[in-house]
Image (spheres, rainbow, N blue to C red):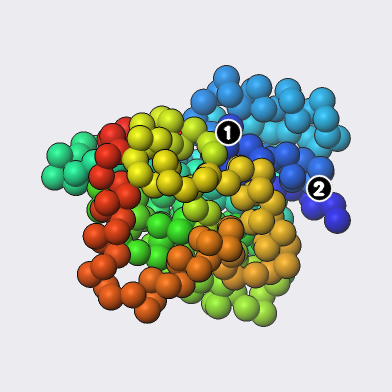
Amino acid sequence: MKYASALITGASGGIGYEFARLLAADCEALVLVARNTEKLDTVKRELEKGFPARIITITRDLAASGAAEAIHRELAQRQILPDILINNAGFGDNGLFVDSDLEKDTAMLQVNVVALTQLTRLFAADMASRGRGMILNVASTAAFQPGPYMAVYYASKAYVLSFSEALAYELKGTGVTVTTLCPGPTATDFAKTASAERSRLFRIAKPASAAAVARTGYDAMKKGKMTVIHGLLNGITAFSVRTAPRKLMPMILGWLHQRGRRENYS
């Protein structure tokens, strides 16, 4: 099926890049948003060689105030009305919260929570007025439990899951669907840029490929599913949290993340 246009944030690498490859085959126009112009241009050239879709890039740091409104305004001026919105951009931080960089934590919330909420609000309203559209918000298996040493990141993903599932219910009957993708450890720059490859989580778990995670999310979105967890083990783990003693999960996650280093995730 061909879609008129789609918008992907965090599209310059990892899962976002894989979403771009999937959508470039199914869209007439594809809007890619990230903060690194050079990486965006590289992805644009690659996609234009392999796919007929018109590729549009927007360099924007979603941590900056007003970024969501600026993106929405620019697309309106270009008369681009996305049928699909994929809120993929996000980053995390590893370390003790009391030692963390408050400015970095605030930027994390701006990207993971505020910008995602604003983009969803702006484009969901447009979609609802047209009676069609699909939104995919990327959360994480981190959304299902608290995460010591990554407290703000885990909390931000819990927000994404809760918000997206509530919105999916509100939009029933409008022609607009909202899907939440919850990946576990994934083979992207996430672990490397965070020095999290030294944590027990990434040493014990075998990361999934970004392509496989993107495909899971894309297929679920097209079917109108509300929530999808990539990987059987991740699904079992996420749902086991509901029956496990509440105080047990911080102990387990704290042990898994304890040896990580505090850095940005891309």
Horizontal placement of 215 versus 185: left or right? right
* Nearest the eye: 4 or 257: 257
Q: Position of residue 130 (x, y in %)?
A: 71, 65
Residue at the location (58% across, 63% down)?
232
Q: At label 1, which amino acid type do we have?
A: Gly
Q: Which residue is drawn at 65% across and 70% down?
A: 225
Residue 37 picture location, percent across and down: 56, 23
Q: Place residue 142 in its image quadrant.
A: bottom left
Question: The disc labelled 2 sits on which kind of residue?
Answer: Asp
SS of the residue under disc 2:
loop
So how many labels did they put on this image?
A: 2
Q: Report crowding for label 1: few under 14, some 14 to 19, many 20 or more residues within 10 A (C-alpha).
A: some
Q: Label 2: which residue?
A: 26
Tag 2 near tag 1, CB within 8 Å? no
Q: What residue would you read off at disc 1?
A: 13
**Which of 43 and 257 lies nearest the eye of the viewer?**
257
Q: Which residue is drawn at 61% across and 27% down?
A: 40
Residue 149 horizontal/vertical position (percent) = 25, 47
**Quick check: can you spot residue 111?**
no
Mark nearest the camera among 2 and 1 is 1
2 or 1: tag closer to the N-terminus: 1
Nearest the eye: 101 or 140: 140
